[in-house]
Image (cartoon, helix red, strand yellow):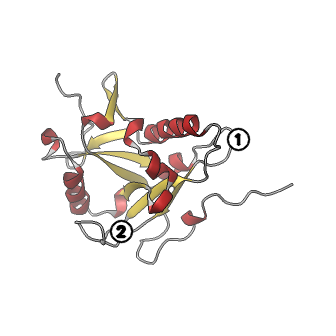
């Protein structure tokens, strides 16, 4: 019997500048730039799978899906970053975020039962960020490469699963759910 190696050793240790490893019970916040990143199920908003870049999911060249550890990020910091990311004028005063539980993301499995994504502490050092450093940044990326034969289908399915994990879509300041705008 062989024991498979942990697909996410990056989760076990946090960089010195992080407040620790990302806990399973933490909420992760992801900024929503505009209504194109939202799909509607009746009156319930969902994050569009297309809003997650394939490059970020793959994690190549130092990329990841960028999130912020909600309870560890100061409200003003979260608001300033969300306003900077926002490109929808109606949301200027109260930008929109989506939230996911870390455990839900870590429980996404492929067809063979292997973990699909890693969630890890990834503090920003401020080098490439107008807002400066942020210790509570967390990254999400695929734990292993897809099979070349099924890569496109697997990646699209994974994008949908990640989008489903970000099931709460709300405004940053008021913490009210996003409402559908009149057409």
Q: Earlier in the sequence, mark 2 or mark 1?
A: 1
Q: Residue furthest bottom?
A: 16
Q: Is residue 130 above or below residue 152?
A: below
- On screen, residue 152 above or below 102: above
Residue at which label 1 appears: 112
Secondary structure at numbered mark 1: loop
Q: Nearer the viewer, residue 7 or 147?
A: 147
Left/right placement of residue 17 relative to residue 105 reads: left
Quadrant including the N terminus: bottom right
Q: Is residue 124 above or below residue 87?
A: below
Residue occupying the point 37% across, 65% down:
136
Which residue, given by chain and number where applicable, does mark 2 sit on? 124
Horizontal and vertical percent for residue 35?
25, 35
> Any mark on residue 123, and which?
none
The percent position of residue 105, horizontal first and vertical second, equals: 51, 47
Number of marks: 2
Say which of 66 and 165 sits in front: 66
Q: Confirm whether residue 115 shows in the render.
A: yes
Residue at 30% of width from left, 24% of height from top? 43
Q: Quadrant of residue 49?
A: top left
Percent x, y of residue 76: 21, 61
Which corner quadrant holds the C terminus? top left
């Amino acid at each position: 019997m062989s024991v498979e190696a942990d697909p996410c050793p990056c989760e076990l240790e946090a960089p010195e500048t992080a407040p620790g490893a990302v806990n399973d019970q933490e909420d992760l916040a992801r900024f929503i730039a505009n209504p194109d990143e939202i799909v509607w199920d009746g009156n319930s908003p969902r994050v569009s799978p297309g809003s997650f870049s394939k490059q970020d999911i793959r994690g190549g060249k130092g990329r990841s899906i960028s999130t912020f550890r909600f309870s560890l990020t100061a409200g003003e910091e979260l608001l300033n970053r969300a306003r900077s990311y926002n490109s929808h004028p109606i949301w200027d005063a109260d930008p929109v975020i989506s939230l996911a539980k870390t455990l839900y993301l870590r429980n996404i499995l492929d067809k063979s039962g292997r973990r699909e994504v890693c969630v890890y502490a990834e503090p920003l050092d401020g080098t490439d960020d107008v807002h400066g450093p942020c210790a509570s940044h967390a990254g999400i990326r695929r734990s292993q490469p897809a099979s070349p034969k099924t890569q496109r289908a697997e990646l699209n399915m994974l994008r949908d699963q990640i989008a489903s994990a970000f099931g709460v879509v709300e405004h940053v300041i008021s913490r009210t759910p996003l409402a559908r705008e009149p057409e």
